[in-house]
């Protein structure tokens, strides 16, 4: 019964976008120059253009649509600030529905990102104006919101008196895969890389008798493994098959490699590695701790990142993640922790990193 309930948490629920869109807003913008309102899906392109303009980078439209429209948990919830005189959008932020639970109980949650304000309107208090409207909206008090703000956004949040919503920083670890250099330095780097590879293979030596195979599609068998190996009594993000397929195998721009460990008793675990660019990421590692399968999966993940040309492999997880000891024994070294933003009025302990089980798959930029 407990396993079936956990597996049910991993399936998308009915998208409540229309309820969110039609609920009455308690107040209007306190600044008469601007309108702060919710955004319909037919207006998403307006958000895309604004984000591109502020960030100075033109994202592929399929990437936007994948995140805003194709999320299996529902359409993006976006707030926009519009200059009344010109009708021009000058600010926005997005909230993407995200799977979340405490133990075996589902929680309403969103992942926040793409928070932008036109450059000519920055440092004039307009983010606070948007907050006054969106943060007093009834859904805001009943929804857990998490995000990974950059340093600029963290500074702005501190100025608006919201520093207490940063959780303790989330542990981050790095595995060096090869040296770097040119000419003679390149030869030395190659030697260093060979030594590192040999040492890491020895550190991850395992006696797994099964097979490690590529994943073409996640299905219900993976849900059972996730329910048995990734579920937590604390807050956690249930990554079911629908989520995993969308998040990794259907991603329009990033390259992910998904691997599954198959033993005599069937599926024993899985992992996902992002391999585009020099910085590889261990996105998922789900298997029973201290078992041969998890060591075999990590060994293949390291080899996959190295073969793809990554100079290092990164990992990010909560302090209670069961595989930290394995990663340390494999040579991962401590990196700079990542700050997690949490808004959870109904979960007072949520601002502690110890309250969360998460993975890089819960970071919008990865």
Image (cartoon, grey):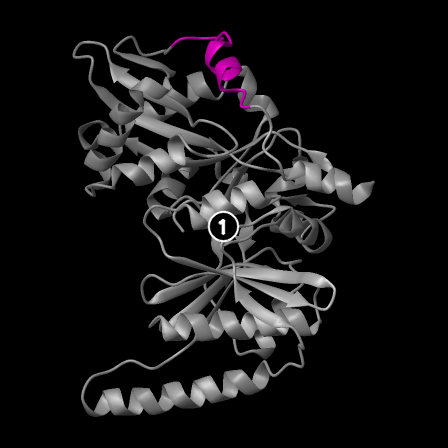
Q: Residue at x 41, y 70 (%)?
A: 305
Residue 4 place in picture, x, y as percent: 76, 40
Residue 346 place in picture, x, y as percent: 66, 29
- Asked which secondary structure carries label 1, the reply is helix
**Residue 118 image-quadrant placement:** top left
Residue 159 place in picture, x, y as percent: 39, 35
Residue 334 place in picture, x, y as percent: 50, 69
Query: In the picture shown, does residue 26 fall above or below 190?
Result: above
Q: Is residue 205 left or right of residue 102?
A: left
Q: Is residue 234 left or right of residue 13?
A: right
Quarter in which the N terminus is drawn = top right
Q: Can residue 122 be seen by looking at this rendering?
A: no
Q: Residues within 10 Å of mark 1 (few under 14, many from 20)?
A: many
Q: Residue at x 58, y 37 (%)?
A: 99
The answer to whether residue 17 is magenta is yes
Q: Is residue 152 left or right of residue 71?
A: left
Q: Residue at x 57, y 69 (%)?
A: 212
Magenta residues, start to end: 15-28
How many marks do you count on the picture?
A: 1
The answer to whether residue 269 is magenta is no
Q: Nearer the viewer, residue 242 or 138?
A: 242
Q: Nearer the viewer, residue 356 or 295?
A: 295
Q: Can residue 336 be seen by looking at this rendering?
A: yes
Q: Residue at x 53, y 36 (%)?
A: 98
Q: Can you identify the residue that label 1 sits on?
A: 361
């Amino acid at each position: 019964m407990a396993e079936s309930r956990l597996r049910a948490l991993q399936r998308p629920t009915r998208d409540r976008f229309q309820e969110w869109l039609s609920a009455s807003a308690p107040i209007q913008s306190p600044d008469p120059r601007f309108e702060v309102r919710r955004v319909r899906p037919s207006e998403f392109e307006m958000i895309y253009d604004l984000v591109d303009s502020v960030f100075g980078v033109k994202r592929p439209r399929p990437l936007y649509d994948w995140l805003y429209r194709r999320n299996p948990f529902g359409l993006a919830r976006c707030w926009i600030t519009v200059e009344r005189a010109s009708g021009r959008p000058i600010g926005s932020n997005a909230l993407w529905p995200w799977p979340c639970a405490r133990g075996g109980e589902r929680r309403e949650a969103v992942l926040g990102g793409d928070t932008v304000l036109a450059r000519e309107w920055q440092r004039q208090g307009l983010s606070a104006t948007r907050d006054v409207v969106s943060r007093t909206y009834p859904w805001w008090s009943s929804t857990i919101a998490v995000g990974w703000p950059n340093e600029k956004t963290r500074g702005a949040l501190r100025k608006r008196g919201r520093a207490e919503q940063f959780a303790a920083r989330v542990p981050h670890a790095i595995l060096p895969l090869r040296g770097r250099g040119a000419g003679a330095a390149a030869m030395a780097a190659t030697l260093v890389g060979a030594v590192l590879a040999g040492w890491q293979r020895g550190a991850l030596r395992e006696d797994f008798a099964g097979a490690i195979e590529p994943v073409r599609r996640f299905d219900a068998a993976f849900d059972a493994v996730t329910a048995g190996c990734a579920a937590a009594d604390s807050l956690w993000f249930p990554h079911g098959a629908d989520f995993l397929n969308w998040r990794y195998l259907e991603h329009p721009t990033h390259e992910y490699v998904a691997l599954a460990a198959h033993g005599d008793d069937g599926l024993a675990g899985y992992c996902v590695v992002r391999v585009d660019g020099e910085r590889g990421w261990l996105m998922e590692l789900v298997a029973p701790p201290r078992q041969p399968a998890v060591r075999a999966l990590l060994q293949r993940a390291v080899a996959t990142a190295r073969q793809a040309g990554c100079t290092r492999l990164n990992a990010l997880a909560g302090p209670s993640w069961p595989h930290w000891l394995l990663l340390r024994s494999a040579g991962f070294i401590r990196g700079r922790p990542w700050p997690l933003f949490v808004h959870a009025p109904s979960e007072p302990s949520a601002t502690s990193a110890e309250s969360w089980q998460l993975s890089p798959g819960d970071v919008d930029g990865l």
